[in-house]
Every structure is written in structure tokens, then in C-alpha cells.
């Protein structure tokens, strides 16, 4: 039987009731895989030559009641903290896996990032047809870039410019079944290809 990287059981973590029980399941099932991905992809991102990248596995340390509904590993050019910087993520919701470039609300340069992307919309619209965009990392949904085009992306970027809590994420999703059926080799290739497609967007984002 072909070895897969993800299993359906991994996604079931988000069905575990209670904060402590879900965190234990995350720590036992998911975080070791995130750490493995950190070891694999940090060198690739660092080799791009735009700074030394470091892996950050989400700890969900601030949670005291509600269990997390998603989790991730982030990659950013900083040893401490990543949320104020444009960063890459590989993560899971109960429904799907995501690999994205994220600009979230803590980033102090959102206006500049918005302007640079609006001036270079083709760096987004030229991405392959399975790439998606989102304006909120707290929600699982996203919109296909090729479907919404300039008219759909521009309002997201304008909101990033004008609204304090606005965000912008771009990347790929794999639904739960797809992700758990991909062989380990095919998943790692998919992740590497996604990062390579997103690096020109990252270059535009950081200016």
C-alpha cells in the first residue's frame, strides 16, 4: 500500500471535543508532521535568497476554553514571531489542507503590500487555476483566482489597504479526501511546487 503523508485520522483531530483533548491530539498526531515539513521546506524558502527562514509550529497557547478549529506551521524570516511579517503556511482545517502566503492583521505594512499587489495584479492572476485567495485566515473558505479575476481580487486588496483587521491569503487548498489519498512523494512535490509558484508573489509583497 502506498504511504501517504496525511491520513483521514489527522483531519479528525478537529472533531475531538474539549481544549485539552484536542491539543493532546494535535501534539501527538499533527505537530510531528508539521516539524517534519519545517525541516524539509525551511531550506527551500531560505535558498530563495530573501532572508533566512525559520519554522514556527502553531502552539495555540492563548487558548483557554475553545479548542482550535485549524492548525499550521508557518515559515518566516524571523526566529521569534511571524505574524507581523508576510509568511508561508502549511495547515489543516477539518475539511481541507492549505498551503498559503499570508498577510494577516498584525502586519504593519498592509497598505504598502496592498499597493504593490494592486500595481502588479498579474503576479496573482497568472497563477494556475487551482490557486485561491481569501481575506480572513480565521475562516476556511476561499475564492478561485481565475474565477474572480481582477474584479474579485481588487476589493480584497482595497480592504487590506483600508481596514485595520483585513488580511490577504493566497495559495492552494486540497480537500480532506484528496490530501489523505496523495502519496507522501506526491504531497511533498505538490507543496514544493506551490511554494515555488508563490515566491514571485512574496517578492512583490516584500517589495
Image (spheres, rainbow, N blue to C red):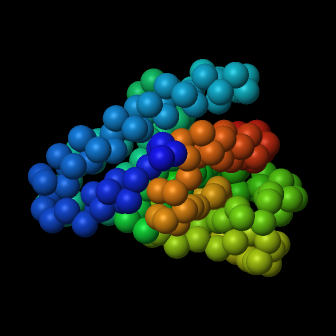
Closer to the camera in the image, 182 or 207: 182
Closer to the camera in the image, 87 or 106: 87
Q: Position of residue 60 (x, y in %)?
A: 27, 47
Compared with 41, 101 (above or below) is below
User: What residue is rendered at 65% in x and 27% in y?
Assistant: 44
- Residue 83 visible in the displayed image: no
Compared with 92, 36 (above or below) is above
Q: Position of residue 92 (x, y in %)?
A: 43, 56
Compared with 182, 55 (above or below) is above
User: What residue is rendered at 12% in x and 52% in y?
Assistant: 20
- Residue 1 visible in the displayed image: yes
Q: Quadrant of the C terminus?
A: top right
User: What residue is rendered at 21% in x and 49% in y?
Assistant: 25
From the viewer's perspective, is 165 left or right of 49?
left
Q: Position of residue 19 (x, y in %)?
A: 15, 57
User: What residue is rendered at 60% in x and 39% in y?
Assistant: 185
Closer to the camera in the image, 147 or 151: 147
From the viewer's perspective, is 129 left or right of 52?
right
Q: Quadrant of residue 17?
A: bottom left
Q: How many marks?
A: 0
From the viewer's perspective, is 77 left or right of 161?
left
Closer to the camera in the image, 63 or 32: 32
Amino acid at each position: 500500500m502506498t504511504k501517504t503523508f496525511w491520513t483521514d485520522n489527522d483531519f479528525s483531530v478537529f472533531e475531538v471535543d474539549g481544549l485539552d483533548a484536542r491539543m493532546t491530539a494535535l501534539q501527538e498526531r499533527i505537530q510531528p508532521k508539521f516539524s517534519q515539513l519545517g525541516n524539509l521546506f525551511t531550506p527551500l524558502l531560505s535558498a530563495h535568497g530573501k532572508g533566512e527562514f525559520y519554522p514556527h509550529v502553531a502552539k495555540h497557547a492563548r487558548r483557554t476554553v475553545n479548542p482550535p478549529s485549524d492548525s499550521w506551521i508557518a515559515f518566516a524570516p524571523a526566529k521569534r514571531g511571524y505574524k507581523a511579517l508576510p509568511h508561508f503556511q502549511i495547515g489543516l482545517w477539518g475539511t481541507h489542507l492549505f498551503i498559503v502566503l499570508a498577510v494577516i492583521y498584525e502586519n504593519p505594512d498592509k497598505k504598502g503590500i496592498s499597493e504593490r499587489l494592486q500595481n502588479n495584479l498579474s503576479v496573482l492572476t497568472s497563477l494556475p487555476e487551482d490557486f485561491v485567495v481569501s481575506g480572513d485566515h480565521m475562516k476556511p473558505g476561499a475564492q478561485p483566482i481565475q474565477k474572480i479575476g481582477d474584479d474579485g481580487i481588487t476589493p480584497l486588496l482595497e480592504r487590506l489597504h483600508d481596514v485595520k483587521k483585513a488580511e490577504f491569503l493566497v495559495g492552494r487548498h486540497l480537500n480532506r479526501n484528496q490530501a489523505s489519498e496523495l502519496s507522501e512523494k506526491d504531497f511533498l512535490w505538490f507543496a514544493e511546487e506551490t511554494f515555488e509558484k508563490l515566491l514571485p508573489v512574496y517578492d512583490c509583497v516584500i517589495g
